Amino acid sequence: MSENGPAAGRGAVPGLASPHSLALALPELYLEDDFARGLVAAFDEVLAPVHCSLDNLDAYVDPHLAPHDFLHWLAGWVGLELDSSAPLDRQRVLIAKAVELYRWRGTLQGLRQLIVRATGAAVEDVELEESGGTSWSLEPDATPPGSAEAHLLVRVRARWDVEIDATRLDAIVDAAKPANMPHEVRVVQ
């Protein structure tokens, strides 16, 4: 499969032989007829890419092997919205790790891993601070730590070789954090 362009290898491919020739299915009476064989040969040429695609269907649903124009469709299967400007290898890894990321959804660890996968930042460059806290105490009416006002601060240090779109990062955080928690995103160059 090619990375050269949309639908590369899935249209009419001159000279691509069909692995399932229709001529073999003709009644014996028509096997000697040049017109009948020529007619089904034209269908073979049109259907060859279809057979080829179906024979390689497992590659289309593998994020590491799928043609790049299938990645957004494949991401839709796992509920992701891909950033088209991100490098292809980062998009492929994000799709491949989607189920694992959903397992940690709503946690700081899950949000950190999502930010790392989506932006290409290093784990140590992603800082998350949340204002709330919980605790238990043997003393009644003990004051829990943290602030009563919920807030999430996401700070990402962008290295010189990684460009991070703050607007896109804000949308990622907004989709992954708890719904009623206000947040702020800071990208530090």
Image (cartoon, rainbow, N blue to C red):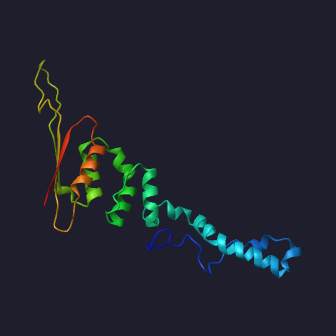
Where is residue 66 drawn, in percent x and y?
Answer: 47, 65
Residue 174, by quadrant, is: top left
Residue drawn at x 34%, y 49% is 101
Which quadrant would the C terminus be assigned to in this image?
Answer: bottom left
**Direction from residue 115 to residue 33 in the image, left or right:** right
Residue at the limit of the structure toward the right, as seen here: 29
Where is residue 93 drawn, in percent x and y?
Answer: 36, 60
Residue drawn at x 17%, y 61% is 158
Residue 153, by quadrant, is: top left
Residue drawn at x 51%, y 64% is 59
Q: Observer-nearest residue: 131 or 50? A: 50
Query: How many numbered marks are there?
Result: 0
Where is residue 159 drawn, in percent x and y?
Answer: 16, 64
Residue at the limit of the structure toward the top, as seen here: 140
Where is residue 155 drawn, in percent x and y?
Answer: 15, 51
**Direction from residue 104 to residue 51 in the image, left or right:** right
Q: Observer-nearest residue: 44 or 148? A: 44
Residue drawn at x 21%, y 65% is 162
Residue 16, by quadrant, is: bottom right
